[in-house]
Image: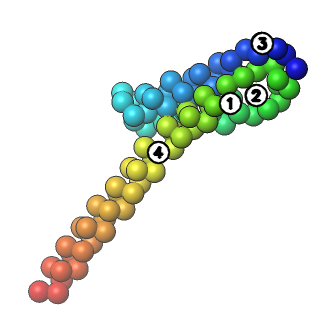
Amino acid sequence: MNPNPKTSPLAITSLVTGLLGWTLMPVLGSLVAIVTGHMARAEIRRSAGALDGDGLATVGLVLGWLPLMLGMLGLVAVFMFLGGIAWLGAMG
C-alpha cells in the first residue's frame, strides 16, 4: 500500500470533461467523461493502492451521464407533446 498515492490522470480528465459537458462541449465532453471515468475506475482498482482519484472519476461519470439523460428525457417530452398535438389535430 502506497502511503502517497498519485491521482489518476484519467480521473482528472473525466472530471474536467464532465464539467465541459455542461458548458462548452455538451455531447463530446459528456461522452469523453463517461469513457475516461470508467477507464480511470478500472485503472485505480488494478493499481493496488498506487493510484487515487476514484471519487473524481465517479463525479466525472455522474457529470457525463446527467446531461445525456436529461437530453433524452427532453426529446421524449418534445415527441410526446408533438404527438399529442397531432392526435388532437386528427380528432377534429
Separation of residues labelled 3 and 2 (CA atoms): 14 Å
Disc 3 marks which residue? 4
Q: Nearer the viewer, mark 4 or mark 3?
A: 3
Q: Is residue 23 left or right of residue 28?
A: left
Looking at this rendering, what residue extends furthest in the left direction? 92
Q: Earlier in the sequence, mark 4 or mark 3?
A: 3
Please tell me whether residue 67 is drawn above or below residue 4 in the rendered image.
Answer: below
Identity, as a three-letter code, of the amino acid under mark 4: Leu
Separation of residues labelled 1 and 3 (CA atoms): 15 Å
Q: Nearer the viewer, mark 3 or mark 2?
A: 3
Identity, as a three-letter code, of the amino acid under mark 3: Asn
Name the residue located 40 percent from the left edge and 30 percent from the top edge: 25
Circle 4/circle 3 CB separation < 8 Å: no
Q: Earlier in the sequence, mark 1 or mark 2?
A: 2
Identity, as a three-letter code, of the amino acid under mark 1: Asp
Separation of residues labelled 4 and 3 (CA atoms): 32 Å
The x, y position of residue 71, in whole percent, is: 38, 50
- Residue 44 is tagged as 2
At mark 3, the secondary structure is loop
Circle 4/circle 1 CB separation < 8 Å: no
Name the residue located 51 percent from the left edge and 38 percent from the top edge: 64
- Residue 66 is tagged as 4
At mark 2, the secondary structure is helix
Separation of residues labelled 1 and 2 (CA atoms): 7 Å
Separation of residues labelled 2 and 4 (CA atoms): 23 Å
Please tell me whether residue 3 is drawn above or below residue 48 in the rendered image.
Answer: above
- In which quarter of the view is residue 4 placed? top right
- Residue 54 is tagged as 1
